[in-house]
Every structure is written in C-alpha cells, then in structure tokens.
Amino acid sequence: MPKLKTRKAAAKRFRATGSGKIKRRKAYKSHLLEHKSAARRNRLSKSALVSEQDEKNVHLMMPYL
C-alpha cells in the first residue's frame, strides 16, 4: 500500500490534542488590530477546536494526525 501524502498547508494550521481533537487558531488576529478592543484581541489569541463537522475534512488532509 502506498503512503498517503499530508497537505503541508493543513499541517501548518492544525495540531492534535491529547484526546485526539484538532486545535486551530482563530481568525481576525493578523492585521487591522488598532480598532479592535483589547478584550477581543485577547479572545482571538486563544486556540479553538475544529468543529465536529469539519474534523473529517481535516483528517483527509492529514491522514496521520
């Protein structure tokens, strides 16, 4: 059986937790931060989990996750 390739773009964006869930970064934290409140910027800094509906797609992109 041939090996499956990992999508490198996805590998840079997602990590697995200890229980097997998939972590991701939140959007809207890369630029135009001046008008966003400090509380909002702090919330966006924290990591989030990929939703259950999207987990299948991430596993297809990263078969060995």
Image: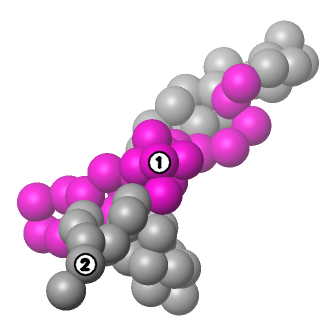
Instruction: Tell me which residue sits at (38%, 76%) in the image.
Output: 59
Q: Which residue is mark 2?
A: 2
- Percent x, y of residue 31: 80, 20
Instruction: Tell me which residue sits at (47%, 48%) in the image.
Output: 8
Amino acid type of the residue that numbered disc 1 sits on in the rendered structure: Lys
Q: How is colour applied across the structure in the image?
A: one colour
Instruction: Tell me which residue sits at (19%, 86%) in the image.
Output: 1
Q: Secondary structure at mark 1?
A: helix
Instruction: Tell me which residue sits at (44%, 79%) in the image.
Output: 60
Instruction: Name the foreground residue: 25 vs 37.
Output: 25
Q: Is residue 19 left or right of residue 57?
A: left
Q: Is residue 56 left or right of residue 37?
A: left
Among numbered discs 2 and 1, the one appearing first in the sequence: 2
Q: Which numbered disc, 2 or 1, marks the residue closer to the eye?
A: 2
Q: Residue furthest front?
A: 2
Taking the magenta stretch, the answer to whether it contains residue 21 is yes
Q: Is residue 50 above or below residue 14?
A: below
Amino acid type of the residue that numbered disc 2 sits on in the rendered structure: Pro
Residue 50 seen in this snapshot: yes
Residue 21 seen in this snapshot: no
Instruction: Name the foreground residue: 27 vs 37.
Output: 27
Q: Residue furthest top?
A: 34
Q: Which residue is mark 1?
A: 8
Q: Secondary structure at mark 2?
A: loop
Image quadrant in which you'd find residue 27: top right
Quarter placement of the C terminus: bottom left
Q: CA distance from mark 2 to mark 1?
A: 18 Å
- Give the residues in magenta: 7-30
Q: Residue furthest left?
A: 18
